């Protein structure tokens, strides 16, 4: 089992309705099936993480298949092997875990963490096999060296926490924006657009794969354009008037550029 108490770091025993540790700290399972392991004193605001509006917009966008090449690349780097566990940190509403399950992963081998309760609730309602937890990537409620595969897509997380939870011989797959990601959109919205910098080195993990996943995609219809803008920082950044003009268009051609890296943890 991978979960530990967020208050004392003792391993958690998973009951049907409650998770608890030997120090009598207990955490109830919500009706949707997730467990909240984010202590109140670690919250910076009342409801941290992405809003329900952003999450629903992201769900509609992702389920339309616009990022299918990214999903296929991730699946190729994380093939299922019996008995292994995969944890998605910053899982949002659970899209990538559901796609991995469709690609051959068994639900009981998958787990997701996100600081957004709305996102975790949505993920748990749609997935009956994986385990979902509300938590912060800064303090993962995960037993040291318990995870075979860690997945991180655009999510911030300290290197030492990721290294701590991965087993020796286990992998991290990290997805970051490439330099040209959404470049044409940036040119619409910013006077001086800047390309994304190269992702930083991850300490104490050895790189195995470093690849680019680049592809064009076309948003068709005002709803698709509005969803895409709502699910990204562009919802509140950039030139407001230009953003409103984009929302009135019937289609929008963009480019995706992802840097995908796989690391292994050696002794």
Image: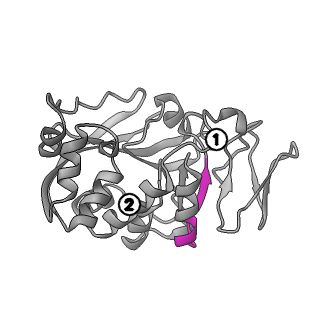
Which comes sooner in the sequence, label 1 or label 2? 1
- Residue nearest the viewer, comparing 13 with 81: 13
**Which residue is pictured at 71% across the width and 33% down the height?**
41
Q: Are marks 1 and 2 in contact (CB under 8 Å)?
A: no
State the image coordinates of residue 250 (x, y, percent, origin top left).
Answer: 15, 65
Quadrant in the picture for residue 265: top left
Residue at position x 54%, y 39% in the image: 137
Q: Please state the horizontal and vertical placement of residue 51, each as a whole percent of the image.
A: 49, 51
Highlighted magenta segment, given as a residue range: 123-134
Q: Is residue 81 magenta?
A: no
Disc on res. 235: none
Residue labelled with disc 2: 57
Determine the secondary structure under disc 1: loop
**Secondary structure beneath label 2:** helix
Q: Please name whichever residue, 221 or 88, is drawn nearer the observer in this view of the structure.
A: 221
Disc 1: which residue: 46
Q: Estimate the x, y position of residue 62 in percent, counting from the top left.
A: 33, 63
Q: Position of residue 86 (x, y in %)?
A: 49, 55
Q: Nearer the viewer, residue 186 or 156?
A: 186
Q: How many marks?
A: 2
Characterize the local packing of mark 1: few (<14), some (14-19) or many (20 or more) Cα atoms within 10 angstroms. few
Residue at the image position 64 percent from the left and 41 percent from the top: 46
Q: Measuring 77% from the left and 68% from the top, which residue is drawn there?
A: 16
Name which quarter of the figure residue 226 lies in: bottom left
């Amino acid at each position: 089992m991978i979960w530990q108490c967020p208050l004392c770091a003792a391993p958690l025993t998973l009951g049907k309705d409650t998770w608890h540790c030997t120090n009598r700290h207990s955490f109830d399972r919500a009706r949707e099936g997730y467990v909240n392991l984010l202590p109140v004193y670690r919250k910076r605001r009342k409801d941290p993480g992405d809003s329900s509006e952003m999450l629903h917009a992201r769900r509609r966008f992702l389920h339309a298949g616009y990022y299918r090449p990214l999903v296929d690349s991730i699946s190729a780097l994380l093939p299922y092997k019996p008995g292994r566990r995969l944890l998605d940190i910053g899982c949002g509403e659970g899209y990538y875990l559901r796609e991995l399950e469709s690609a051959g992963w068994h639900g009981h081998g998958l787990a997701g963490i996100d600081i957004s309760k709305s996102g975790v609730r949505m993920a748990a309602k749609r997935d009956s096999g994986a385990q979902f937890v509300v938590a912060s990537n800064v303090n993962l409620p995960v037993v040291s060296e318990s995870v075979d595969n860690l997945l991180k897509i655009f999510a911030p997380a300290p290197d030492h926490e990721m290294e701590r939870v991965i087993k020796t011989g286990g992998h991290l797959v990290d997805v970051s924006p490439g330099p040209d990601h959404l470049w044409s959109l940036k040119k619409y919205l910013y006077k001086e657009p800047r390309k994304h910098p190269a992702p930083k080195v991850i300490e104490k993990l050895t790189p195995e794969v470093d690849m680019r996943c680049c592809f064009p995609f076309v948003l068709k219809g005002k709803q698709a354009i509005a969803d895409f803008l709502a699910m990204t920082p562009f919802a509140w950044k950039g030139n407001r008037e230009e953003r409103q003009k984009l929302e009135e268009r019937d289609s929008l051609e963009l480019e995706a550029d992802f840097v995908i890296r796989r690391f292994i943890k050696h002794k």
